Every structure is written in C-alpha cells, then in structure tokens.
Image (cartoon, grey):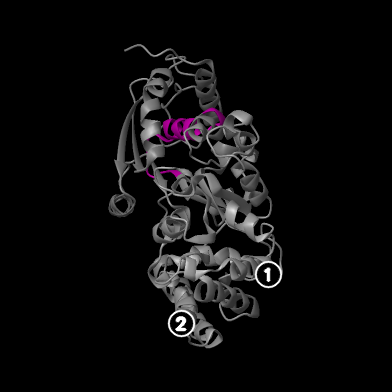
Amino acid sequence: MNFKRKPWLTAAVSAVLTVSLLAGCGSNNASEGSNASGSPAASGDKPFKGKTLSVYIGSNSTSEFIRTQLPEFEEATGMKVDFQVFANEQLSQKLSVQMTAGSATPDVFTIRPLEETKLFEKNGWLHPLNDYASKDTAFDLADFSESSLSSATANGNLIGIPMLTEQQILYYRKDLLKEAGIEVPKTLEELKAAAEKLNNPDKGIYGFVARGQKGALVTQLSSFVFSEGGDFQNGDKATLNTPEFIKASTLYVDLLKNYGPPGVLNMGWPQAMGVFAQGKAALFTDTSTVYPNATDPDKSTIADQVGFAPFPAGTAGAKPYNITAWALSMNSQSQNKDAAWAFIQWVTGKDMVKKLQLHGTPGARTSVWNDPEGEAGFPEGYIPVIQESVKTAIGHDRPQVIKVGEARDVISEIIIKGLVGEDIAAAAEKANAEFQKIIDNEKAQ
C-alpha cells in the first residue's frame, strides 16, 4: 500500500536527523542516519532506511491509535517499527528483566514516571534526553508544561518525554448545585460546606465521593495536601506529621466519612466514579482523564448534568497535581538512539499530540491545549479547567521513592484509621516514622 508522505512528517524527520548529528547522542552507532563524515546519509529523505526499531508500549486507546499511524512514519523514515503492546504491570516486569540483563531492546518504551523513574534512573536504564530535546528547536521543549516535565525528570536528567497527562479536578452535578442555590466550590471550605448541604442519604444522594481504598487514595489526597501547603516529603525527610498534612488528611476523612457513600473504604477510582456517574453523589474529585465515564450516556445516568471545575483552593491556594502518567523513554543500551529519538519526536510532536487529543488523549503541549482544533475532542467546559489547573500545579501525586507502592500503603493508613474513628494525628506520626524508614533504607542502598 502507498502512503502519501505528509510535508510536516518529512520536515520533522529532517529536523531529527539534523539535531541528532549536532547532539552526538547516538555516538555508539556512528553510521546511523549519517555517513562517516557526519553528513546526511545517501538515503536522503529516508535517513533510517533498513533499520528496525523496537518499541514497547502500554496497552490503552492511545497506543492503538499510534499503531494506526505507524505506516506513515515508516514510509517517511524508511525504518520498520516492531511495535509491541503490553498491559501495564506486564510491561514493567518485562522491562525490568530485560534492562537488568543489559538488553539493547526495546529501543523505546513507555514508563509511568512516578512509579518507575527512581528505580530505572538509579539503575542507569534510561538515556537522558536533554540534548536531543533542547537542541531540536523544531521540537520546542518549552511548549511542554513545567510540571509535566518535572514528573519525567530525575537528578536533572530528562528521562522521558510526556505523552499522557492527568490533573486532579472537581466534577459536580450542575442540576443539584442549581437546585440548592450553591455556587461551584472554589475553596476547600466551600467544598465541605457544599458537600454538607447537598448530602441527602434518604434520597440516595451523597454530598461527596472520592477514593477511600488503601494505596489508591493517596494520589487524590495529594492535591488536598499540596493546597494546604504540605507534601509527602521534603527531600529525604518524611513530612506526614506536619500540621499541613494533618489538616488536609482531616478534611479528606471528614468529607468521606460524613458525606460519602457506604463502602468508601473499598473504593478506587472505578467504584467512586460509578457512584457519581449513577447520580448518587453531588461532588467528586479525581483525575481529569476519567471524564468519559461521567459524560458518556452509555455509562452515565447524569451525562448531561456533569460540570467540571478546577480543584478548590486551600490555605496555600489551589495546587492540584499535573502529572505525566505516561512518558516515552529511550533505552540507555540502544544501538539505534537517533532512530529512537525520531520516533519519540514523532509521537510527542505537536502534530501527533493534536491528533491524539482529537482522539481524546490529553497531552502536555500548551500550544495544543490553546488550539481550537486540539480542544475539539473534549466536552464543553473541560478545556478551561485543564488550562487553569496547569498554571499552579504540582508535578507529582505520590511519594517520590523507589518503593512507591509500599509508601502509598503506609500513607493511606492515615486516612483509613481516620475513617474507622481512630486519631488522625497519631496515625500520621506512626505513618511518618514508617515512611522515613523507607526513605532511609533507599538512601543507604
């Protein structure tokens, strides 16, 4: 089949080739995309003709869309892409095994930065992309939001290019707020007051719902903590017992315990969203990317009544997370680094990000969020909320350690203890000591 080469793709490939030669990042494969003198190879407009690039990617609608676009990329570059898709945990395990063995494949892979960066970067499995990204002027690294880049940075090294971003936002029932004469909450105090007023269990309506499940709740607690001026840690010091953290935890417990539905201790995002989408909760905070579950009439009984708002402000202002949920990274052992960058540049370039956003995948490029065409794939009222959220956002939503899962379990005990009636401050002291041990043990290794 013949694929018409788009001018933007040809230009992008040329830009990649030029910056690759300038950066010298692919020096372990001098012949790649250039001849011995360093000038463009005779292949001309197909600089990677005859090469095969190995790509491992997480399974989701984004990866499936990228697969449909591959023929065009292969035609323009001359390379063949061995594109393999894996479930999240399967991918993480497969990467760990192959990287530990020093494998040169895959050349490119997706990582979950806030879950895997610390371990992967410490082990030297990731090739820093600073030079590629900064010297490729056409790529325009400054177009990415600062918080999304910080999610994919470790020890000053950019170890992945943001591919999929998430922010914590507020979902609300337009009809219920209007009937009660309540404005959309702009502060955490207003959120609590609205939840209290809208809570009506006798009619099957709860004021508020969010995650209450062990481990899962931590990411959504984070924005409450940040907005009160706290964090999980300050460098190598655990800060779970600070007044700011305790204040945020107390509010989160109060909202779930007094205005939340039964069984909240067993709720991750699917269960909490299910409560909201079935019309049983007035207010819901969670990640921006789950919105289709509330706005799709086939999944939601309140699809036409869903409103979106920025996360409410606390004592320190509104500080929701804005994180890179998925990033594209390069194997430090890859023998095809220039070709690997060409692929990364293509997937995370402005044109593809716009296509992906039309497909419903929220990217990290400011220009695309400000482009009417880039907004077309999202519901009314959603885009302004994302734009506002990014302005004051924090680039992480969980503790920044290697043993993220273990740390999340420790931290979530503060909320769980509060939900069953135990003292939150005492639970925070205990959790802080346990979290500090995790930090100290990792530092000593």
Residue 70 in which image quadrant: top left
Q: Residue at (39%, 32%) from the top-left corner?
A: 65
Mark 2 vs 1: CB contact within 8 A: no
| Residue 197 at x, y percent in the picture | 62, 69
Look at the image and tell me whether residue 440 can be seen: no
The residue to which callout 2 is attached is 417
Query: For the residues marked 2 and 1, what is the alpha-carbon distance in whole angstroms?
Result: 23 Å
- Give the position of the C terminus as an image quadrant: bottom left
User: Is residue 140 one of those drawn in magenta?
Assistant: no
Q: Amino acid at mark 2?
A: Lys
Q: Residue at (49%, 16%) from the top-left corner?
A: 6
User: Is residue 342 one of those drawn in magenta?
Assistant: yes
**Disc 2 versus disc 1: nearer the observer:** 1
Count residues near mark 1 (Cα–Cα under 10 Å), then give few for <14, some for 14-19, many for 20+: some
Question: Which label's residue is closer to the chain start, 2 or 1?
Answer: 1
What is the secondary structure assignment of the residue under circle 2? Answer: helix
The residue to which callout 1 is attached is 189
Task: Say above or below: 282 vs 380.
Answer: below
| Residue 383 at x, y percent in the picture | 61, 42
- Highlighted magenta segment, given as a residue range: 328-351
